[in-house]
Image (tube, rainbow, N blue to C red):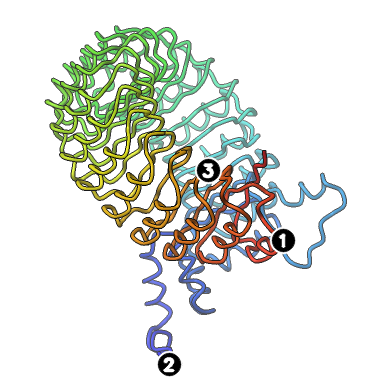
Amino acid sequence: MRGHDWINNSLPDELIGEIFSHLHTKSIRDACSLVCRRWFRLERQTRATLRIGPTHFFLDLLPTRFSSLRNLYIDERLSIRIQHGRKRPADKDSYFESTCLTDTGLSSLGEGFPKLHRLGLFWCSNVSSDGLTSFARKCSSLKALDLQGCYVGDQGLAAVGQFCKHLENLNLRFCEGLTDSGLVDLAVGVGKSLKSLGVAACAKITDISMEAVGSNCCSLETLYLDSEFIHNKGLLAVAQGCSALKVLKLQCINITDDALKAVGTSCLSLELLALYSFQRFTDKGLRAIGNGCKKLKKLTLIDCYYLSDKGLEAIATGCKELTHLEVNGCHNIGTLGIEYIGRSCQNLTELALLYCHRIGDVSLLEVGQGCKFLHALHLVDCSSIGDDAMCSIASGCRNLKKLHIRRCYKIGNKGIIAVGKHCTSLTDLSIEFCDRVGDGALTAIAEGCSLRSLNVSGCHQIGDAGVVSIARGCPQLSHLDVSVLQNLGDMAMVALGENCTLLKEIVLSHCRQITDVGLTHLVKSCTMLESCQMPYCSGITSAGVATVVSSCPNIKKVLVEKRKVSQRTKRRAGSIIAYLCVDL
């Protein structure tokens, strides 16, 4: 206040640090750290989580700058800037080696952060078993380890099992150097504490490892398997030994109904089941789940070609607590299967039907009548679902908050108008490439709902009138996608600028009637805009792009043809905007 720093003069470091510790949003913490040098120092000292790219140069500084760090994630896919004054080596290979995390660097991290709880190493190709062994010796309190894309061997994983007795979460994805030997040793070492295990694309890990997990990891609650080398034998061992299992995600083409029967018999606490691309799985397996897993709440079925309505009937009859259901590309599941769900699963809150051409209106009539707590509905390429289904959902599911529809060509104004009339809690609406939806539908939505996110991409009947109604009726709108709307012009941009001052993201791709004039009105008041995508808008020139850059202090991304970005705009934008150039 007029030169007097009341906060810094009155509050000690400990109290400001305590305040920072309760700020869990990264953007807010980053903003606070820029207030002054003291806050910058204190924010670093109280930060518990850090995500960085390959930064071999700065590892020795991390412990002194981030003394409270408990969660560290290093991703070598992220680009970094070399410190000012460091010269990039002429040899590209030596430059790559110098920026990658090495065994020495990982060992120094263990020394600097002996109380680290979570470590994620993503695609750190220079880390081997030696580095992981050294780290494990120094960080015995480690609880979570992610080694995605790391070429560590069995010796390193065995060391984790030997020294990190509190390990609860382990993710092994694309770890090509691992075999059964390493995972068996780990299971023996941390079997009592391990609660979550993920194994994907590890060609040398087979049923032998899963048998060790079943024998030793009695507290396991979450298992994700994506492998063609794991068969029924491995999953049977897990099901019989890990009765506390709550989450099971499988993408294993060699697992059949027999393994799922064991899960249904032994894993009675199962709450989430996700089955991906099952070629040898039928209704018999799903019937076993329905008979045994009475606590099942979330079920995901993707490309399970041999499942039919009978399988969903078993789930509906046996799993009354089901809250989430996704059916994606299961071509033998039709209207009858979803009818069973609508009649029996009254606690259903989210339903996703994707590429389900055999599911028709009657199924959603039952959902509308029976699932009063539904708050999210996703429909993609459901060619047999039309306005009658949407009217039933609207009248029966009045707590609906999210509605996403894509390429459902039978849904038109009638169904969306009903949603606007009855679903007053709706905040997120996406209607993509639905040719029968026009301005009248958006007017009804604007009158009945307070949207924060709207996507009407490819709905060619929508023009200025509909978007103007949304702008006036939904002042809280923060995300808008109106791409490929040939009838949309500057009038809509003016209305958005006047009413939707909280707008953060807008997509205008292929809107050929929008010009620099409309864009100027839009950004005049929408100062919170962070992303503006406007490629292939023939009415927008380099002057309009410059207006966006100069008028929006929070802008972070602009998508536009390269030829529309002047040198002056480039200089003014600096490193704030990430340009994606897409010239014709």
Q: Picture coordinates of residue 385 (x, y %)?
A: 28, 20
Residue that label 1 marks: 567
Between marks 3 and 2, how big is the CA–CA gap? 50 Å
Query: Viewed as shown, does residue 48 lie left or right of 345?
Result: right
Q: Which element is circle 1 on? A: helix
Between marks 1 and 3, how big is the CA–CA gap? 24 Å
Q: Is residue 326 above or below residue 125?
A: above
Q: How crowded is mark 2: few (under 14 residues within 10 Å), some or many (20 or more)?
A: few
Q: Residue at x 29, y 41 (%)?
A: 442
Q: Picture coordinates of residue 142 (x, y %)?
A: 48, 48
Q: How crowded is mark 3: few (under 14 residues within 10 Å), some or many (20 or more)?
A: many
Quadrant hosting residue 367: top left
Q: Which element is circle 2 on? A: loop
Mark number displayed over residue 251: none
Residue that label 2 marks: 2
Foreground tag (2 vs 1) = 1
User: Which of 388/574 is in front?
Assistant: 388
Of the image marks 1 and 3, the number of the one nearer the N terminus: 3
Q: What residue type is labelled 2?
A: Arg
Q: Is residue 335 above or below residue 48?
A: above
Q: How crowded is mark 1: few (under 14 residues within 10 Å), some or many (20 or more)?
A: few
Q: Which amino acid does label 1 sit on?
A: Gln
**From where the camera sits, is residue 68 visible?**
yes
Q: Residue furthest bottom?
A: 3
Q: Which residue is drawn at 24% across and 26% down?
A: 296
Q: Residue at x 37, y 71 (%)?
A: 18
Q: In this view, does 375 lie above or below 119?
A: above
Q: In which quarter of the image is the N terminus?
A: bottom left
